[in-house]
Amino acid sequence: MTVFRISRRRLFVTAGAGVVSLAVVNTVSACSTSSPPAEPVLTSDAPLPQSTALPTGWHRVDRSYVSAYLLLRGKEVAIVDTGTQGSASAIEDGLKAAGSGWSAVKHVILTHYHDDHIGGLEGVEPQVKATIYAGEFDYGNIISDKPIKPVRDGEEIFGLRVVNTPGHTRGHISLFEPDTGTLVAGDALRTQNGLEGSDPQFTTDPTTAVASVKMLAALDVKAILPGHGEPLTSGAKEALQKLAASL
Ligand SMILES: [Zn+2]
């Protein structure tokens, strides 16, 4: 039995294929070996999210411990992952810094159900008229006031191809933008210590996670935007192929 996460609202415990939820009080949320953050304190003096040299249209909302990403196309925006609980203000800052705002958000895509990727959804939902998506094998584990649309491998959302990357969680998805070679990898890949696969400590099925990395290495990847660590915007394909060959 593995305890994956504890949130204010739920404790998820996996037992075989079943998922049991219990109400708890304290927050302990992690799917990386980095220390979970203290409760975020957001003030009007908080610095705007960093703007790094990402592929055209992409913006990072850097929550230090974890990142969310924004994709702007014309007047529409997609948000990929929502950070930890309390991240909505930082996402709003990111939208403003990109010259946009909540009203442009039409898609909210969640790579998997861990709290540090869906925690901000609670604050995002009331702000947007958007479709919320998650992988067909993870969406049922996400608590949401609005319906979540399950997506399958190969589906396209806003020019992003859904790529099933199971292992970290059963229903983990990555998003690949063929036009720019951008891969939003969720927790299938991480970059805190060079490019690595899913953190074994928080991986449901290590063998499947390795298979997912090898599959991603076959894509024509030019930039990797991970949940944890800095984006990798040069030499990404070579680094990914080297990683896949080492596993
Ligand atoms: Zn995770």
Image (cartoon, helix red, strand yellow):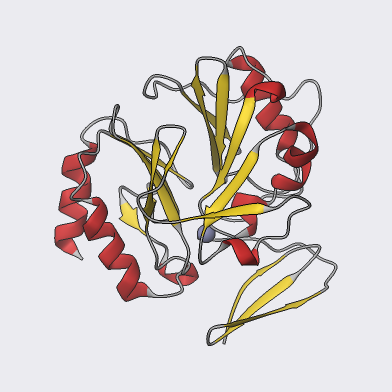
- Residue 110 vertical position relative to residue 182 in the rendered view, above or below: below
- Left or right position of 165 against 38: left
Q: Residue at x 34, y 67 (%)?
A: 209
Q: Is residue 56 visible?
A: yes
Residue 171, position as x, y percentages in the image: 48, 64
- Left or right position of 218 against 117: left
- Which of the 4 quarters of the picture holds residue 224? top left
Q: Residue at x 81, y 65 (%)?
A: 26
Residue 15, position as x, y percentages in the image: 58, 87
Q: Residue at x 76, y 43 (%)?
A: 86
| Quadrant in which the C terminus appears | bottom left
Identify which residue, 31 or 126, lies in the foreground. 126
- Which of the 4 quarters of the picture holds residue 95? top right
- Left or right position of 170 against 143: left
Q: Is residue 48 visible?
A: no
Residue 113, position as x, y percentages in the image: 59, 60
Residue reaching furthest to the top: 99
| Quadrant in which the N terminus appears | bottom right
Residue 120, position as x, y percentages in the image: 70, 45
Q: Residue at x 71, y 22 (%)?
A: 103
